[in-house]
Image (spheres, grey):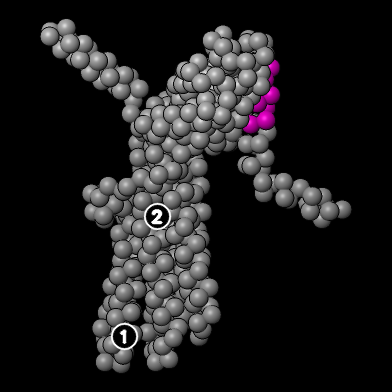
Amino acid sequence: MRKKVAKIFDPLTRRRAWIRRVLVASSAAATSWIVGDQLVPNGGLVAAIVCALSIRISIYKSVREGFGQLIGTAIGASIALLTVHLFSFGFISVGTTVLLCSVVARALRLGEVASVNVPVTALIVLGPGLSESTALNRLSSTLIGAIIAIGFSYFSHAKTPAGRTIDQIARIGKKSADLLIEISEGYASAFNQKQAGTWLVKARLLVEEIPDLRSQAIEAREYAKWSPLSEEEEADSLYINGVAVEHMVVQVRTIARRVFDASQDKQRVTIVDRAIAHALSATSVAISEKIELIKRPDDDHEDGAIAKELQVVADNLTEELILRNQQIPRDQFVRCMSLVSAITIIAASLDESSPALLNVKTPEDPSSQPIMGYAPITKTTKLSRRVWISVRKFLRR
C-alpha cells in the first residue's frame, strides 16, 4: 500500500516547485479577472491576460516585466489609436502596430520576453470597437493585471533569489564532485574509452548549466540593490561564488577531456595513474567541502584552508611527475601536467583568490540583461532637455 501511495505522490513531490508556480499563476490570473471586472467595465479578460504574461518566478523579475509591460503597452496603445485613426481597423493597422511596438521595445531595451509581450498586449488594446474610452479601460486593466502579477510573484517560489542561487551552486558543485570521484575511481582501476566518453559528456552538460547559474546570481545581486529583504553583501558574495563555480566547471571539463585522450594511450604508467586518482579524489573532496561552506557559511577562513590543502596535493602530484619524468612518454607527461594546472586553478577558485575572479568583469548573458536598458526618468529628462534646446534655437532665429 505504501509503495502505491509513494508511486502516486513521488512525481508530485519532485515537481512541487513547478506545481507551486502553476497554482500561483492560475490564482493570480483568476484574481486579476475578478478585480478587473469589478474596477473596469469588462476589464477582467485583459487584466488576466496581462497578469499571465507578466508573472514570473520572483517578485524582482515580475517588477521588471510588469514595468516594461506598462511602459510598452502605453506606447503600444497610443500607436494603436493612431494607426486605427489613420488606416481604420484592419490588416494595415495591425501590421503597423506590431512593427512600431517591436521597434519601441527594442529602443527601450525591454528584453526578449517583453519585446514579444508588448505587441501582444497592444493588439489586445487594438481589439474591435477601439475608441479613446475603450483604450483607457484596457490600459487600466493592463495596470491591474501587472500589479496583481507583481504581488502574487512573491509566492511563486519558496526561496529568495539568493536562496535559489545557493541551490544552483550546490547542485552544480555536487555534480562536479561526483564526476571527479567517478574519474578518480576509473584511474584507480583500468578505465576504457567508453567510460571516458561518458565522463566527457557529463562534463559538457555541466558547462551548459553555467548560463542559468550566472543569470540567477545576477538576479540575486540586482534584487538585493532595491529590496530591503536581502543583504547586498551576501548577494555580491554569491555572485563571486557563482563565477568561481563557473571557472571550476570549465576545469572539470578540461580534466574530462584530458582523461578521454588518456584512454587512447596504451603506454600509461600505473604508478602515475594512481597518483592522479588520489589528486582527483582530493579535488572532489575539496569541492564538496566548499559547497557545504556556501550552504552554511559558519567560518569564512575555512575556504582558504581547503584551497591550501588542494594546492599541496597539486604540488605533490607535480613532484611525482617530475620524479618519474624519464619513465613517462612526453605526450603523457604534458597531459598529466595539464591535469595539475586544472587542479591548481580549481584550488584558486575555491578560496576566490584568483585575479581572474576579482579583476576581470564577467560579461552578462542576454537572458540576464535588465528589462529597461535605460532608466525611464533619465531617458525622459534627456529627451525633454533636447526638445527644450531645439525650441530655444528655433525661437532665437
Identity of the residue furthest to the right in this view: 1
Tell me the kind of residue under disc 1. Asp
For this rendering, which residue is in front, 93 or 325?
93
Q: Is 124 placed left or right of 64 in the picture?
A: right
Residue appearing at x 67%, y 49% in the figure: 14
Q: Which residues are magenta?
A: 25-34
Per the picture, the main secondary structure of the magenta-coloured stretch is: helix
The quarter of the image holding the C terminus is: top left
Residue 251's x, y, as percent? 37, 65
For this rendering, which residue is in front, 370 or 263?
370
Q: Which residue is mark 2?
A: 245
User: Is 88 drawn above or below residue 4 in the view shown?
Assistant: above
Q: How many marks?
A: 2
Category of crowding for the residue at label 1, using alpha-carbon neighbours closer than 10 angstroms: few (below 14), some (14–19), many (at least 20): few
- Gap in angstroms between the C-alphas marked 2 and 1: 29 Å
For this rendering, which residue is in front, 174 or 216?
216
Q: Secondary structure at mark 1?
A: helix
User: Is 325 drawn above or below residue 336 in the view shown?
Assistant: below
Q: Which residue is mark 1?
A: 331
Category of crowding for the residue at label 2, using alpha-carbon neighbours closer than 10 angstroms: few (below 14), some (14–19), many (at least 20): many
